[in-house]
Amino acid sequence: MVRSPFLRKAPVWVVMKMFRKFACCFVVLTLLLSAGCVRQPREEEDATYHIVASFYPVYIFTLNLIENVQGVSLSNMTDGTGGCLHDYQLTTKDMRLLAGADMLVINGAGMEKFIDKAVGGAKDLTVVDSSAGVTILEEAEDAHEDEEEAQAGEHSHEAAAHIWLSVPNAVRQVDNIYQALREALPAQAETLSANRDAYAARLNALDAELKADAAALTEPIVTFHSAYAYFSQEYGLPVLASIETEEGAEPSAKELAGLKEIMRREQVGSLFVEPEYAGTSAGVLATETGAKIYTLNPITSGENIKTAYEDLMRNNMRTLLDAEGRS
């Protein structure tokens, strides 16, 4: 082994002191690197502008706006989540995604309550509430609520969060996202503006089409998800009753009895469930009332393609027309 002349002549205590200093510096440097404290500036690491959408509808809206926009990425934070986000819990993966994001696009209207604390202290994260300017409705009271409870004011009114099921609301959401993107990416303003105009034209055409089709609808409906307040208001579809249960749970016998009474009294011939519905209660109601079961899509999941929202809204209208034998 080759040794330095200095080390050969130096006392042992000197050599050991030098070794300890070297080891200490090495440990500190290792800890700093592992914690991410020693790193290059972000613009040298990654010049991409990272956008995260909270869930499916706003992901599709943003996807249309960033077509051909250079230097951006888009992720759906809750990709793979089939239902709404009322009971969603952030995961470690979500937190990592948010930590690397420049912009977070949310639906708003109370849909993403779970995310408030996570982004509250994020100074460099732009949060875009796409519900800004939308008139927010209150959730309708469940048909099975006790009359005494209602009179006593014991029920609570929460915001109806499914604003995207009205196409004019969706256009407003697109505009809100567009304005935020234009401010964040001024060099891409021309492309963003063209994308916004093209998408808004498609959505306005969709709205006119749905309203023309909805004019033929006359029968009220009962649903197993209270998601259609905005759809009902926009397209004149009367929702007699809806039942909202905890995810994976079935309605109680009392709730089913309330729905059955309404369906028999109003001669409701159609009952609507969600694509992910796997319970048995709808089948029981259908058997006892003679109603047929159909599927409406609240558009909380689907294909990651630009026309997905339009396709699913058209499918919903076709389903409603089929239920009345008007297709």
Image (cartoon, rainbow, N blue to C red):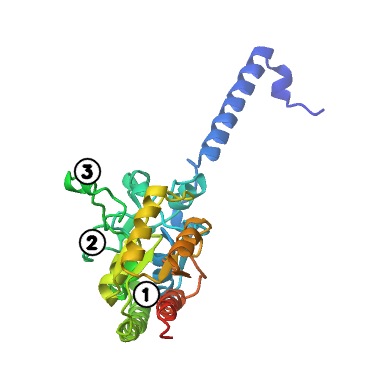
The residue tagged with tag 3: helix, strand or loop?
A: loop
Identify residue type, mark 1: Gln
Residue behind mark 2: 137
Residue depicted at x 61% and y 18%: 17
In this rendering, the label closer to the viewer, 1 or 2: 2
Neighbor class of circle 1 (other Cα within 10 Å; few <14, some 14-19, many 20+) is some
Pick whichever, 43 or 51, lies toward us.
51
Q: Which residue is label 1 attached to?
A: 188
Disc with the residue nearer the chain's start (3 vs 1):
3
Q: Position of residue 289 (x, y in %)?
A: 43, 65
Q: Residues at badges 3 and 1 in contact (C-beta under 8 Å)?
A: no
The residue carrying mark 3 is 154
Asked if residue 2 is positioned above or below residue 189 in the image, the reply reads above
Task: Return the disc, 3 or 2, that comes first in the chain's sequence.
Answer: 2
From where the camera sits, is residue 182 visible?
Answer: no
The type of residue carrying mark 2 is Leu
Residue 218: % across, % down:
31, 79
Foreground residue among 309 and 186: 309
Q: Quadrant of residue 240?
A: bottom left
Mark 1 vs mark 2, CA separation in Å: 35 Å
State how far apart marks 3 and 1 are (Cα). 51 Å
